Image (tube, rainbow, N blue to C red):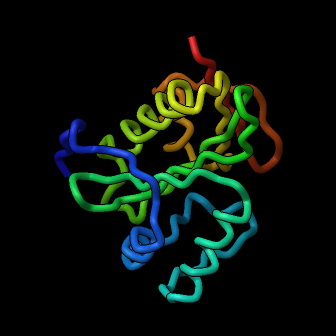
Amino acid sequence: MQVEQDRIKLAPMTAEMYRSNFMEYENDPDLFLPGQAYVHYEYSEEKVRQYVQRQRDRNRIPLAILYGDEIVGEIIIKNIEPHTCATMGITLKNAKYKDCGIGTQAERLAIQYVFETLDIPTLYADTIQSNVRSQHVLEKVGFFYIREDKDFKYYRIDKM
């Protein structure tokens, strides 16, 4: 897939965007912890409704990753401590949008949003130990490794 970087944008995620995203969503085997069985994702309105409600209940900022007019994934800003720190998570809806620069550009936009719009100087991220693709992207956009445990690697980036 040839990607035009300037066509990638972030926008506040709406319930309708979630429905669109999850219609084509596929679980990524790289995102399962060792010992966890891979589970095929099956769309249901009820699952989407519950997911949207959980995002609201947990005081998160969900952002749609748009490629042109198409929603291709989500970035969540969570664990927000105003003017101090937050944590970023990203998912792309299926393999079609991976390894083509969309995640990298979306993460760059999210970092800019957190630093400039939210005025938060420190952003954290974590990845499952086996998710080498995500670790590579985090380091590529400026995060540095800080520690790990048996399941996750943890990263940090600070506003300059």
Q: Position of residue 104 (x, y in %)?
A: 40, 37
Q: Position of residue 153 (x, y in %)?
A: 71, 39
- 100, above or below 146, in the image: below
- 115, above or below 75, in the image: above
- 17, above or below 48, in the image: above
Q: Nearer the viewer, residue 133 or 160?
A: 160
**Quadrant hosting residue 36:** bottom right
Looking at the image, which residue sits at the far right? 149
72 left or right of 50 in image: left
Q: Nearer the viewer, residue 56 or 78?
A: 56
**Quadrant hosting residue 39:** bottom right
Q: Position of residue 113 (x, y in %)?
A: 49, 33
Question: Which residue does the image show at 32% across and 44% down from the upper left?
Answer: 9
- 107, above or below 43, in the image: above
Looking at the image, which residue sits at the far top? 160
Q: Nearer the viewer, residue 135 or 90?
A: 90
Question: Which residue does the image show at 35% across and 47% down from the upper left?
Answer: 99
Question: Which residue does the image show at 38% across and 52% down from the upper left?
Answer: 65
Q: Nearer the viewer, residue 11 or 91?
A: 11
108 left or right of 27 in image: left
